[in-house]
């Protein structure tokens, strides 16, 4: 049925746009989460290793066991090497590995060079974090605008669906109600418009119009029959000799021939 189809299409469009908007919002969060997680896994881990080595180098010679000091530095370096995510890190870590033994032995120049390389390694990871953050922001902005556009599209589709339902269902039903109310008030000429609406409602409106037309034809026919009947009665009375009248049970005169009318209009009419 066309009416059922229109309603299904309108509801289907609204539900589809709602589901699509929800899926896009979830997809946005799913795409942003790996970007943030990558910052934590790839860069923060390396920065922790850099900070650990700098902290060990900041301890004066003799305040810590040399073996423990070496182990801490080597462990931190191993963590940094196992978490290489940028191409620039590899060369920097190789340089740190060359400078590390000399720095452990207490060479001031080696320590300064090692600190410089460690800071450079930290800068590499911070730059990578900034790029990942910019990517997450870009994804967030793109996803937000996508959700906004989908929401706007859903709003527009909702307006179109509401307009279609109004034209296909609400307007024809209002037209039908107005026509029936007019017929009840005695406006015999009012009819339903059948140019809009679903196929089922247009057929219903046409049926109502045909019923009203049939009612009007019966009414006109009954009035015509009454006129014809009165003409026949008057012709019959005029054909009779003398004054002839027809009265109802209450004594009121309903019809009279010409002779009776002349008599009733004379001086003795009241007595008659």
Image: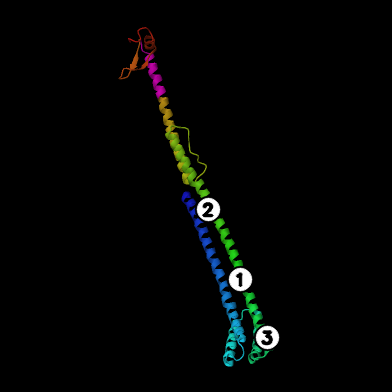
User: Which residue position holds label 2?
Assistant: 158
Within-10-Å neighbours for mark 1: few <14, some 14–19, many 20+: some
Q: In which quarter of the image is residue 225?
A: top left
Taking depth in this image into account, of 164 and 242 the one nearest to the observer is 164
The answer, for residue 89, to whether it is visible in the render is: no
User: Which residue position holds label 1?
Assistant: 133
Mark 1 and mark 3 lie on one chain; the one further toward the N terminus is 3
What x and y, as percent, mark residue 56? 60, 86
In the displayed structure, would residue 64 be above or below residue 240? below
> Marks 1 and 3: CB-CB under 8 Å?
no
Q: What element carries label 2?
A: helix
- Residue at the spot 60% in from the left edge and 79% down from the top edge: 47
> Marks 2 and 1: CB-CB under 8 Å?
no
244 part of magenta stretch: no
What x and y, as percent, mark residue 46? 60, 80
The answer, for residue 133, to whether it is visible in the render is: yes
- Residue at the spot 61% in from the left edge and 71% down from the top edge: 133
Q: Is mark 1 on a helix, strand or loop?
A: helix
């Amino acid at each position: 049925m066309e009416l059922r189809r229109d309603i299904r299409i309108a509801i289907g469009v609204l539900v589809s746009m709602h589901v699509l908007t929800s899926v896009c919002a979830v997809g946005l969060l799913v795409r942003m989460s790996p970007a943030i997680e990558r910052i934590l896994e790839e860069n923060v881990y390396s920065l922790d290793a850099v900070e650990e080595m700098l902290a060990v180098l900041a301890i004066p010679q003799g305040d810590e066991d040399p073996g423990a000091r070496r182990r801490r530095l080597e462990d931190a370096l191993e963590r940094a090497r196992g978490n290489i995510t940028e191409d620039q890190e590899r060369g920097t870590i190789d340089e740190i590995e060359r400078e590390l033994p000399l720095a452990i032995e207490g060479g001031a120049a080696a320590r300064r060079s090692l600190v410089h390389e460690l800071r450079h390694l930290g800068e590499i990871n911070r730059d990578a974090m900034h790029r990942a953050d910019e990517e997450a922001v870009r994804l967030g902005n793109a996803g937000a605008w996508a959700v906004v556009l989908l929401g706007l599209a859903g709003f527009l589709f909702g307006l179109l669906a509401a307009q279609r339902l109004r034209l296909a269902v609400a307007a024809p039903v209002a037209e039908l109600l107005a026509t029936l109310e007019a017929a009840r008030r005695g406006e015999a000429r009012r009819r339903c418009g059948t140019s809009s609406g679903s196929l089922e409602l247009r057929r219903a409106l046409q049926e109502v119009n045909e019923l009203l037309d049939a009612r009007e034809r019966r009414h006109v026919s009954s009035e015509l029959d009454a006129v014809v009947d009165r003409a026949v009665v008057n012709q019959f009375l005029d054909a009779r000799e003398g004054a002839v009248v027809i009265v109802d049970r209450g004594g009121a005169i309903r019809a009279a021939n010409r002779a009776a009318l002349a008599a009733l209009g004379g001086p003795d009419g009241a007595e008659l």
